[in-house]
């Protein structure tokens, strides 16, 4: 009810305002919390009065950011991280999509494989990293294998349940109209399961992102995770915080511009988001 | 009757891949040449597993990990409920704070390990900080949206019947947001578990994560694998025996969430 009131209020106030002003006012509302946090942080530094490596001020972080940018370290690290992330995510997600369809379509295979898959899923990727390090050494291979491993499971589970919950009517209708198995997969199974598949993609992307940071801490000599870790071992805490902020911004950027826009371009446009909500 | 039989058959079917993995693992060390540490024979791992059970080190590390998880989850979730409920009670505050929360949520977890080491030194406290941080920020958004989804009619009805703030909290807000709370706690525990293992690997001298990564330096692959298996089994137990039971007893029985 409160919501309804607020909407009518703003709409009557904003009649004369341009769209730009509307956007800027919402931007202002969104940034106010962050600005307050920064001010609070900057003020608290002289009050707490600790060594700057222990509790750096926002200004120190800004200087570290400029320094990293100027030396070209930051963007080469971001590019390294992005490459590893994409490689691992794409490999894991495509494997999961393929296996997910296969498993969902055959009950025998599902019953045979699911216990093993559940067990492997329970051994989180973090626990695999020591073994991967022994097998593949420190470096790209270990990270990509670990990320593939993380990305695989959420996508697999969502693809499976997406396909398994398709109403049998659709499948029977397509079959009686003479659809080939190939057509069935690409024109019935995948589109109807799309909302769940996208949920899976989103979960995979999120877990993989955290996996990236940790595997870079242990097994890399570059990248955002390495920056976060290296900064603290050299007592350059400001650099650690630059890394953390980059990580947060990168994830928000990814979520807003890629994952949400994929969702908009597909399920929302097809009008299927409602079914997604009722299923999950 | 038939159902029971089918169930048994399914269980047997599910064992086949495990048996296959064990067989391949048994054959490879006998037929191929490679450094022993890459893949120790399965019997070595089993033997090692019994060794660490007998000398009590597995139990010690497992208990250390579970203790951290329990404390971290307890503190983190209670904080999340307190802060989440108070944020959700004011629309303006939640509007201003939600970008901050989204941002902190996106960096919650392993990224805090280095800072935690600087602030608390290497040890249990650093790991605890990371777990609490992870649990708190992973579920606070669920708490806020859960509370905000409660129809305000209910709140007004309770108020006009003279409910005290405490009564509203325990009889309306928390039960009303329960579904979201359970979903939030479950995902936050998944993130918290990863953060725990990761934190122990980097910042602790106790726990399953420490045991696993420490063994890499001595090329004791059998210990690494024992650690991994324990981590997997523990997580299955936690998720299935604990959270699924709670879900079955509450939201699924109430019919708010379907499986």
Image (cartoon, coloured by chain):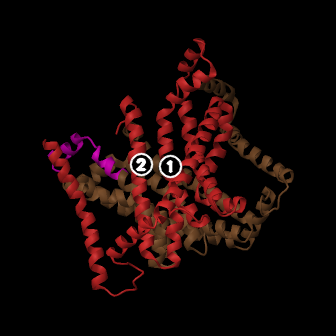
Chain colours: A brown, B red
- B237 vs B183, nearest the viewer: B237
> Is disc 1 surrounded by few (<14), some (14 to 19) or many (20+) residues within 10 Å?
many
Single out the residue that lies furthest toward the left. Answer: B2
The mark nearer the N terminus, 1 or 2, is 1
Quarter the C terminus of chain B occupies: top left
Q: Secondary structure at mark 2?
A: helix
Considering the whole magenta stretch, tell me its main secondary structure: helix
Up-down relation of residue B172 to residue A25 (above or below): above
Name the residue that disc number 1 marks.
B189
Residue located at (63% from left, 29% from top)? B89
Query: From the viewer's perspective, is B128 left or right of A141?
Result: right
> Is residue A185 in the magenta section?
no
**Mark 1 belongs to chain:** B
**Mark 2 belongs to chain:** B
- A266 vs A58, nearest the viewer: A58
Name the residue that disc number 2 marks.
B239
Up-down relation of residue A168 to residue B19 (above or below): above
Q: Position of residue B111 (x, y in %)?
A: 61, 60
Q: Position of residue A82 (x, y in %)?
A: 55, 66
The stretch in magenta equals A158-178
Single out the residue that lies furthest toward the front. Answer: B55
Quarter the N terminus of chain B occupies: top left
- A141 vs A69, nearest the viewer: A141
Callouts 1 and 2 close, C-beta under 8 Å: yes
Q: Secondary structure at mark 1?
A: helix
Query: From the viewer's perspective, is B65 left or right of B256?
Result: right
Q: Is circle 1 on the same chain as circle 2? A: yes
């Amino acid at each position: 009810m409160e919501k309804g009131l607020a909407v009518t209020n703003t709409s009557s106030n904003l009649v004369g305002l341009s769209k730009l002003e509307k956007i800027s006012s919402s931007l202002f509302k969104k940034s106010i919390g962050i600005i307050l946090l920064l001010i609070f942080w900057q003020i608290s530094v002289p009050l707490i009065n600790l060594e700057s490596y222990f509790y750096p001020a926002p200004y120190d972080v800004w200087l570290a950011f400029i320094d990293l940018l100027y030396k070209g370290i930051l963007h080469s690290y971001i590019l390294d991280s992005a490459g590893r992330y994409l490689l691992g995510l794409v490999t894991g997600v495509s494997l999961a999509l393929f296996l997910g369809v296969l498993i969902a379509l055959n009950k025998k295979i599902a019953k045979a494989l699911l216990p093993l898959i559940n067990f492997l899923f329970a051994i989180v990727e973090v626990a695999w990293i020591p073994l991967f390090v022994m097998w593949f050494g420190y470096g790209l291979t270990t990270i990509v294998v670990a990320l593939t491993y993380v990305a695989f499971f959420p996508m697999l589970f969502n693809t499976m349940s997406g396909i398994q919950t398709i109403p049998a009517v659709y499948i029977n209708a397509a079959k009686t109209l003479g659809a080939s198995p190939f057509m069935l997969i690409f024109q019935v199974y995948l589109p109807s399961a799309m909302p769940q598949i996208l949920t899976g993609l989103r979960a995979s992307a999120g877990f993989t992102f955290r996996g990236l940071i940790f595997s870079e801490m242990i097994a890399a000599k570059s990248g955002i995770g390495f920056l976060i870790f290296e900064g603290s071992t050299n007592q350059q805490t400001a650099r650690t915080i630059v890394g953390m902020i980059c990580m947060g911004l990168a994830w928000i950027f990814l979520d807003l511009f890629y994952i949400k826009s994929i969702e908009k371009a597909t399920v929302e446009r097809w009008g299927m988001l409602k079914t997604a909500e009722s299923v999950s | 009757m038939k159902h029971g039989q089918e169930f048994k058959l399914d269980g047997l079917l599910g064992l086949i891949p495990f048996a296959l993995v064990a067989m391949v693992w048994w054959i490879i060390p006998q037929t191929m040449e490679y450094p022993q540490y890459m893949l120790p024979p399965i019997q070595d791992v089993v033997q090692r597993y019994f060794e660490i059970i007998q000398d009590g080190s597995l139990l010690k590390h497992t208990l250390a990990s579970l203790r951290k998880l329990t404390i971290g989850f307890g503190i983190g979730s209670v904080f999340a409920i307190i802060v989440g409920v108070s944020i959700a009670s004011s629309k303006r505050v939640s509007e201003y704070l939600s970008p901050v929360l989204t941002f902190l949520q996106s960096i919650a977890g392993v990224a805090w390990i280095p800072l935690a080491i600087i602030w608390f030194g290497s040890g249990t406290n650093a790991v605890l900080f990371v777990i609490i941080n992870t649990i708190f920020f992973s579920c606070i958004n669920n708490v806020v949206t859960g509370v905000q989804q409660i129809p305000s009619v209910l709140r007004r009805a309770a108020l006009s019947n003279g409910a005290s703030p405490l009564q509203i909290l325990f009889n309306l807000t928390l039960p009303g947001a329960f579904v979201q709370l359970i979903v939030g706690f479950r995902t936050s525990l998944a993130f918290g578990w990863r953060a725990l293992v990761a934190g122990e690997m980097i910042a602790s001298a106790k726990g399953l994560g420490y045991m696993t990564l420490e063994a890499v330096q001595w090329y004791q692959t059998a210990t690494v694998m024992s650690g991994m298996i324990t981590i997997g089994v523990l997580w299955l137990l936690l998720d299935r025996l604990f959270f699924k039971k709670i879900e079955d007893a509450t939201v699924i029985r109430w019919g708010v969430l379907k499986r």
